[in-house]
């Protein structure tokens, strides 16, 4: 007779997502997973497969919980400039409020694994493309409203914006000064309006 699982799979996946986000893929050991998730090694592997499979599921969960709503909001944000500023402010505030700065799980994974892991690279590229498409449409609306410059295409401006946002996500791992974050945010938004 098969044993019934006595744990919430989604809750365990959430814990795994936070552990991988905090430590990265390589530094997270199987024992770290067992200790943090509070389930046996056999339950871990029976439910989620190997460490890599669990990581991929955690990365997809991160997208679902932290990225998809941001993409959806881009299409309906009434004030596009505020929407872009709010994205920056969220990253800044999260970094200033935490005892440690994790940065962005997607950016961390892009740096750590995408160059050598085709499956992770595909996930990161998909998210990046979806973010670029959403930002491009939002910026194009801002251009039509006279908020943003038309000197460059909406696509070029969205790539500049996202590159700066991702740079901020890396910067928060080593920078703790609010003024430094504000400088980055203000210069980027001013450049979009120039």
Image: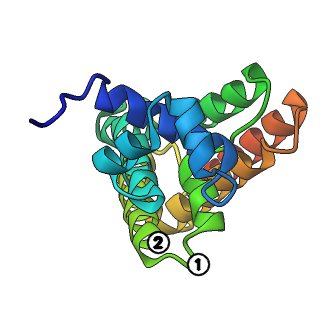
In the depicted structure, whether residue 147 falls above or below residue 54: above
Q: Position of residue 60 (x, y in %)?
A: 37, 50
Q: Are dots 1 and 2 in contact, CB under 8 Å?
A: yes
Secondary structure beneath label 2: helix
Which residue is rendered at x = 30% and y = 48% of the image?
Answer: 46
Which residue is identified by label 1?
115
Which residue is rendered at x = 37% and y = 50% of the image?
Answer: 45
Q: Position of residue 151 (x, y in %)?
A: 56, 66
Q: Foreground: 175 or 13?
A: 13
Which residue is identified by label 2?
121
Of mark 1 and mark 2, the one earlier in the sequence is: 1
Secondary structure beneath label 1: loop
Q: Position of residue 10 (x, y in %)?
A: 32, 31
Quadrant location, the N terminus: top left
In the depicted structure, whether residue 74 falls above or below residue 115: above
Which residue is rendered at x = 60% and y = 29% of the image?
Answer: 90
Q: Foreground: 94 or 18?
A: 18
Query: Residue 125 lies in what quarter of the image?
Result: bottom left
């Amino acid at each position: 007779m098969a044993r019934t699982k006595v744990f919430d799979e989604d809750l365990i996946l959430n814990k795994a997502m936070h552990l991988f986000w905090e430590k990265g893929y390589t530094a997270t050991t199987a024992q770290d997973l067992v200790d943090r998730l509070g389930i046996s090694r056999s339950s871990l592997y029976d439910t989620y497969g190997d460490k890599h499979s669990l990581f991929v599921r955690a990365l997809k969960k991160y997208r679902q919980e932290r990225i998809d709503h941001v993409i959806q909001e881009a299409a309906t944000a009434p004030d596009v400039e505020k929407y872009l500023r709010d994205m920056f402010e969220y990253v800044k505030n999260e970094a200033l409020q935490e005892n440690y700065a994790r940065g962005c799980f997607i950016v961390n994974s892009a740096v750590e694994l995408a160059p050598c892991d085709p499956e992770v690279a595909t996930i990161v590229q998909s998210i990046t493309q979806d973010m670029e498409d959403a930002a491009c449409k939002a910026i194009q609306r801002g251009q039509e409203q006279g908020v943003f410059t038309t000197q460059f295409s909406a696509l070029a401006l969205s790539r500049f914006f996202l590159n700066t946002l991702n740079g901020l996500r890396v910067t928060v791992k080593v920078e703790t000064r609010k003024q430094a974050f504000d400088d980055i945010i203000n210069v980027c938004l001013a450049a979009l309006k120039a």
